[in-house]
Image: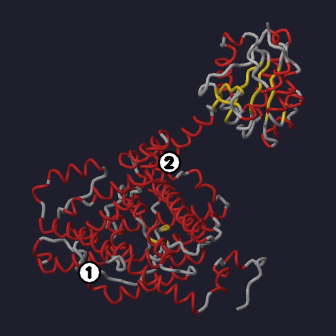
Amino acid sequence: METISKHSLLPHIFPFLRWWPEVNSGTVKSDLLSGLTGALIVLPQGVAFAAIAGLPPVYGLYTAMVTPIVAALWGSSRHLVSGPTTAISLVIFSTVGQLAEPGSQAFIQAALAVTLMAGAFQLLLGLARMGTLVNFVSHVVVAGFTAGAALLIALSQLKNLLGLNLKSENSLISNLANVWKNLELTNFYALGIGILTILTALLSKKYIPRIPNLLVALVLSSALAYFLGGADAGLRLVGEVSGIFPPFSIPSIDMKNFASLAQSAFAIALLGLIEAVAIARAVAAKSGQELDGNQEFVAQGLSNIVGSFWSCYAGTGSFTRTGLNYEAGAKTPLAAVFAALLLLLVLLLIAPLIAYLPIAGMAGVIILVAYNLIDWRFIKVVARASKRQTSVLIITLAATLLVDLEYAVFIGVMFSLIFYLQRTSSPNVAVVAPDPDEPNHRFIYLERKKLPECPQLKILRLDGSIFFGSINHISSEIRRLVDDDPAAADVKNLLVVAKGINFIDVAGSEWCMHEAKRWRDKGGGLYFAGLKIIAQDTLVRGGFKQAIGEDHFFVTKEEALSSLFGKMDRGICSNCRNRIFIECKELPMPA
């Protein structure tokens, strides 16, 4: 097959032309088998996710048909599978539910409008080459949001699990209070079906892992509901699913609610991009393929824009279906295309049976999906590793539960950046001294081991950058460790071990110049050892290094000590018994 020149414009417009020449009978066979597995998996998920979003079940299936095709053909990942997801579905329900009654025609129109706007945001960010934007949203924030969303999803399904036909309220507390007040109306047939669905899904996954456990659980729950009498037993069913083919419709944006829709759309766009790029990167790390974050932004944007015209609500990359696609041996993005087309074929065969799905059974599946969303292992790692990161996770989780969902991710990002700035503005400044028991008299923190110091030279190690946000902290630490130390009364020279300094900005350069003058006024000087060349960039360009003194910068600490030893007051040296430097051995011991 003829290959396309890498300099051609066509692959940039139609990215699938880059991998299309690799398609052959072998890859098609692998992709077809992977696609069939994906179609069976997404069938119950699509129905469940639509229920979470407050939409009729068929809209989740539409999203699973159209969105993955566009995302696969225009994305850069070979294995990413897009479509409906739990978190995005919940955000749709939470934000659009404030404008219209879930399930109503007005709600559906608003959901499609939000999807179109979210896709437009994503496409613009991709075209503007803003693929690095997702780097500012840490995995901790995503984990906190996902855990909070999972709890919201599970708790929102309590009424369906108990067979209670209650109106959804705007807050978690109101919904739980409503369930509590109506607890005596529990339909135990529904509760039994829900519990059986969960147990069936868990057991089939453990003992028959090759078959789609959620599909098995829903089939069994439907059969049980039928034998119990269905609607005659007070069981709520999904009902007839009409229109298997996604119908074309033009999203209508209500200008009265434009500001609210735009705000929700941007939150959905950002969350969708975070999920898609994070999942694509995780799989790319295993497969060894190169990933273009900007192209993924474009692909997600196009998939949501096109999907909104074909009755799809917002979708993004799915961790479950992407991981399964990779494990099943998919070779090209055609696997995602096959999954979407095979889903349509499966629906044509079993559409009438969906009407018998009990709402309680779907609630059981949704609760199970929600539980699996929580990354318990990662949460445990964060809790052990960092108090600050644990705080970010807890704050994001709490925000997800207590405030509007579109703000939760932003709150998590804000606190994550605040804690990051706190850490970078408080670099570690510590006194070090050479240890005679170590090879080459390696420098040791005095906090770890009490060592003698030179009465004429203070040595500090600085780990962090010298910039406008850290200057006050560094100055305070120098005052505390040097100026306020009675034992440092004769210290006239300060040596900064600067290997840990990554950059110095203009404000930091000015501070270094003024600090150097302060030490010169004392009769000594400020010196740096091991400062990276790249960290000296501003010092050199701004003339600050010359003002401080070119001879005050040393490549190694050994070179610095050798030079500074020649500047020492020999009168003080003659009475000093510490002899901590190698050069000190040349001097006679005091009587």
Q: Residues within 10 Å of mark 1 (few under 14, many from 20)?
A: some
Label 2's element?
Answer: helix
Residue drawn at x 80%, y 43% as measured from the top left: 534
Q: Name the spot of residue 47 as percent of width and height, x first.
A: 34, 73
Q: Say which quadrant the C terminus sits in.
A: top right
- Determine the image quadrant of residue 300: bottom right
Q: Which of marks 2 and 1 is in front?
A: 2
Q: Is residue 378 left or right of residue 227?
A: right
In depth, the one of 55 and 230 nearer the eye is 230
In depth, the one of 558 and 354 nearer the eye is 558
Residue at the disc numbered 1: 240
Q: Name the spot of residue 451 as percent of width and height, x first.
A: 66, 22
Q: In this view, does 92 lie to the left or right of 353?
A: right
Labels 2 and 1: the sequence-earlier one: 1
Residue at the disc numbered 2: 410
In depth, the one of 314 and 392 nearer the eye is 392
Instruction: Identify the colour scheme used.
Output: secondary structure
Specify the amino acid type for callout 1. Answer: Glu
Residue drawn at x 70%, y 31% as measured from the top left: 443
